[in-house]
Amino acid sequence: MSKMLTKEDLAKYPFLDQSAAFIEGYNLTLSDLSAPAYSGIVGRAVERVRCSIEGGASPLQLGDPETEILSYPLALALVYASRVRWLVNRFATFEAKRCEELLKMETAPKLAEVAKASFGWRVGLEDLKLEWERLTFSLGMAEYLEVAPQFHSPSWKLTNKYVDRGRVFLDAKDFARLLAENLKLRIIRKAGEEGVKDFELPAALQPHLGGIAGLLEGKRQLYEDEFPEGLVDDARPPCIVAIMNDLSAGKSLSHMARFAITTFMLNVGESVDGVLKLFGNVADFDEGKARYQVEHIAGITGSRTKYAPPKCEVLRSFGLCAEPDRLCATVSHPLNYYKRKVRAGAGAKAPTGGEAPTREGRVKGRGRGAGAAGVGGEKGAQGRPR
Amino acid sequence: MHKVVLDEFRGYYSRLPAEQLDVKDFVRREYALLHFGDQKMIRHLKFDSVSELKRSLVEGVPANVYYSSAYYRNPQADDMNAKGWEGADLIFDIDADHIRTDCKDEHDTWACLDCGCRGRGFPPDACPKCGMKKIDTVTWVCEGCLETAKREIFKLIDDFIVPDFGVSLGEIEICFSGHRGYHLHVVSEGVRGLTGDGRREIADYVRGIGLDPKEHGFRQVTGTGPIVGPDMRDGGWRGKIARAIYEFVSGRSQEELRAVVGPVVADNISKGREKFLQNISDAPPHWGGMRGYSLESLMKIANAAAREHVCNIDERVTLDVKRLIRQPNSLHGKSALKTARVSYSDLERFDPLRDAVAFMGGSIKIYVKEIPRVRIGDCEVGPAKGTEMEVPRALGLYLLCKGAADPRV
């Protein structure tokens, strides 16, 4: 174990490499944990999951670091075995937040040590004093870019960072945030890995999974996105409105604009025929070819991948982000915009500003994807919870 | 394509030493060939050796040869998921076509396919007459275009790749694309794992997308207090903005400043220009050392100045994690020039219309349909229309490949 990291640190940051080594020292299998002697660990693991679902605090029990350390992988196992994507995101967000709070209280050398010992980051301790800020950390650009694109505040853009010779300079607060976000990403990505995807919990632990499923039942309406049938006009984001205006004016669209409008319409529940009708006005419209392409995008033909629309950042790069409004500033994906407006009652009662208090509101500032299962990935549309 | 072009292309590949086709981790790359007259590439090819690739080029005589920026476990798999992506080089593409140059008025034309409206120079996004976006273009490159592209690649390397991204000259490969621009490949291990999102950030960085000067330290202390801001010696865009403002204010006329910040502020700054420049180059800089301008007008100057320091890359190429990119030392089917590797130290002297010529000696008789002034090597022809001429082989092949001439026996 690194000299700087104590057993208490492992309890605080159970994702450290050393925690894994510590757990291996116990030589336990998951089935072993169902024995009465370990009921404390199982209880703590279930509590971790429960807190992540219910959003309550989960006070750290530093008096019993072993339980803290051992319950973490078990909690993860429960989450993965649930196969509910929403729960994976939720748990990841919860752990990241917990960890960020703790990291903020650490000294710079300790923070750097945690980053190195958990994710192998090449951290530099700097002392760059600028007019306003004091940048105490530097990180390799590639490592920074693994995580930072998750945040959509302009201050996280590489363009707006202090950069020098392949290193990105950060203050302690941002560094802790980045580290926590990376933890979240790792937890979420792992869910898609072979061996985790179809992970089955040992029979003796299954009852705990049942309890978790019960808790999830109450949250179902939060993670099952049910769009009303057909397009709710008032809920369309400005970029989609602009593309549709171009279409009805008979203008010929760029490839990316076509892709964006097609994927958007399909994802809000429009039929292939409905999408084709939109293109009817365009001068170079060839129904046979268009149908093939729309069906391909819908996942009916071809690779069977159902595509999600491009996220805001992509649309911006392609010059398709048009007249963003206030709600736009709070989302990173056109489907999220639509979802939030639909939930806020667009179509029924016309919303004006679009500041919709939703569940995303509560996890605000946690980066995108936090509560948005099924949106944002290349094949995001497949990721809906089953 | 004309038989003479196919024969010459085959001859070129037969003479080419196979090792000139080598690229880093050759066997982990996907290859793709596009034949003359075909719309669809033959993809998912894998070659075990450069001589096997050479054999295939001599036999098939493709118009264009591409390899993947990505490294794959199974480059030959036709399903992207089965290919086993193991990282990719970071590619920058600078194309004279995307940069507005004055010379385009001399050699480029465009026409609206809907209403027939025509014009010269850089094509508009939409037809100025009918508003439709189907614009057909006839474009040529001249020394001016290629020189602009070269300046852009220098800017990319000297202002971004080396100082900001920390990539050494030994980790980059520069290629003339064979037609209108340059490709820069960053082949270091450090960039291989970058995701599409990470690459987008890099593309946005060099294009200055999302740049906000206020994120780089420009503030006003309390409501009406002094303005503070970055130091020219700072890293990244922070220092670049400060230097850009210095350059902008020192190099612009009062009139030009007026266009950016309005008459009052422009006049105040030009009156105290010397002092302003001295103040902001001090260490630490004094951004508010004189009266007569607000933080907001300074931000207008910052944004205008920064725009002159961005690099015009084709961002789609950079953010793609599995781009097919032109094979070094292969021929370009639209120019018969080769995709030539150029070292950084030779770049200044590099003349693409001479140094990327693949065919030496000989001459060809051609019938020219319509061309602007064109130079290949030392020979210059045009403007010309509907005439027969005998030209050096390289120039003749260039015009045949561009589709602007037909062979005559």
Image: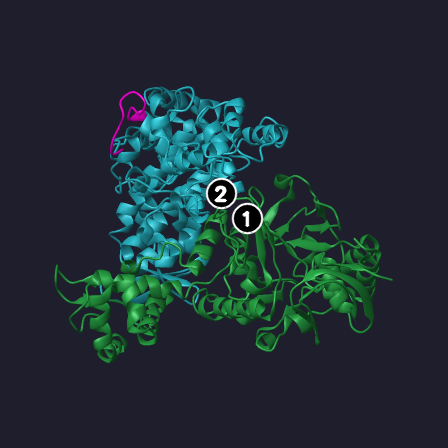
Chain colours: A cyan, B green
Please state which of residues B409 and A264 is positioned toward the viewer in this rendering.
Answer: B409
In the picture shown, does residue B298 fall above or below A240?
below
Q: Measuring from the top left, give residue B199's x and y in whole percent.
A: 48, 53
Residue type for callout 1: Cys
Disc 1 secondary structure class: loop
Q: Which residue is mark 2?
A: B130
Question: Any magenta on residue A344?
Answer: yes
Report whether A196 appears left or right of A303.
left
Disc 2 secondary structure class: loop
Please state which of residues A43 and A262 is positioned toward the viewer in this rendering.
Answer: A262
Q: Measuring from the top left, give residue A383's x and y in whole percent.
A: 47, 31
Q: Main secondary structure of the magenta part?
A: loop
Question: Any magenta on residue B13?
Answer: no
In the picture shown, does residue B127 fall above or below B214?
above
**Marked residue chain, label 1:** B
Q: Quadrant of residue B397?
A: bottom right
Report whether B74 appears left or right of A310.
right
Q: Measuring from the top left, give residue A173's x and y in whole percent.
A: 27, 54
Residue drawn where x is 21% and y is 77% of the image:
B271
Residue type for callout 2: Cys
Q: Measuring from the top left, give residue B102's x and y in whole percent.
A: 51, 66
Q: Which mark is residue B246?
A: none
Residue drawn where x is 36% and y is 68% of the image:
B240
**Marked residue chain, label 2:** B
Report whether B293 appears left or right of A207.
left
* Residue A39 shows up from this direction: yes
Asked if labels 1 and 2 touch by Cβ distance under 8 angstroms, the answer is: yes
Q: Quadrant of residue B186?
A: bottom right
Q: Which residue is mark 1?
A: B117
User: Magenta part of the protein: which range?
Assistant: A343-354
Is disc 1 on the same chain as disc 2? yes
In the picture shown, does residue A302 fall above or below B132?
above
